[in-house]
Image: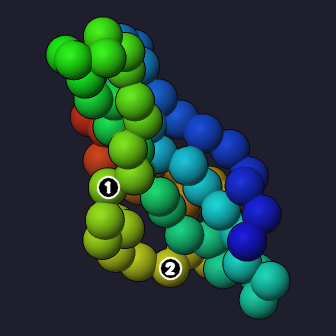
Amino acid sequence: MTKIKRISTEDGKESVEIHQSKEGAYVLHKYVQKYDFEEEVYYEVRVTPDPAGLFGDADSATQEAKLLLGLE
């Protein structure tokens, strides 16, 4: 898988990465930022399962990522 782009919310607490498989399909990986009060640091955690769907082009994957993040 090759990372194509990353789209984040304005506050940076949620993001979606768009990856392209070797076969050419696009998939989404969602991440959220979590705060560890003991360590006093933020960690980025991948949300599983991944958002459903395979996309045929980067534009449709980008549109879905923005919808997932509430940007559209």
Q: Is residue 41 above or below residue 69?
A: above
* Horizontal and vertical percent position of residue 51: 34, 66
Q: In this figure, which residue is indicated by the disc labeled 2? A: 54
Q: Is residue 1 above or below residue 2?
A: below
Residue 57 shows up from this direction: no
The chosen color scheme is: rainbow
**Mark 1, other Cα within 10 Å: few <14 / some 14–19 / many ≥20:** few
Please name the residue shown 30% across and 47% down the image. Answer: 68
Three-letter code for the amino acid on which mark 2 is drawn: Leu
* Horizontal and vertical percent position of residue 3: 72, 55
Image mark count? 2
Image quarter (top left, top right, bottom left or bottom right) of the N terminus: bottom right
Q: Quadrant of residue 14?
A: top left
Please name the residue shown 31% across and 17% down the image. Answer: 39
* Horizontal and vertical percent position of residue 44: 42, 35
Q: Which mark is residue 71?
A: none
User: Dot 1: what SS?
Assistant: strand
Residue 27 shows up from this direction: yes
Kindly report the distance in space between the C-alpha atoms of the residues bearing marks 2 and 1.
Answer: 17 Å
Residue that lies at the very extreme toward the bottom in this rendered image: 23
Q: Quadrant of residue 49?
A: bottom left
User: Dot 2: what SS?
Assistant: loop
Going from N to C along the chain, the mark reached first, 2 or 1, is 1
Q: In this figure, which residue is indicated by the disc labeled 1? A: 47
Query: Position of 24 compared to 29: left or right?
Result: right
Three-letter code for the amino acid on which mark 1 is drawn: Val
Query: Position of 1 compared to 34: left or right?
Result: right
Image quarter (top left, top right, bottom left or bottom right) of the C terminus: top left
* Foreground disc of the pair 2, 1: 1
Please name the residue shown 37% across and 20% down the image. Answer: 42
* Horizontal and vertical percent position of residue 26: 62, 71
**Mark 2, other Cα within 10 Å: few <14 / some 14–19 / many ≥20:** some
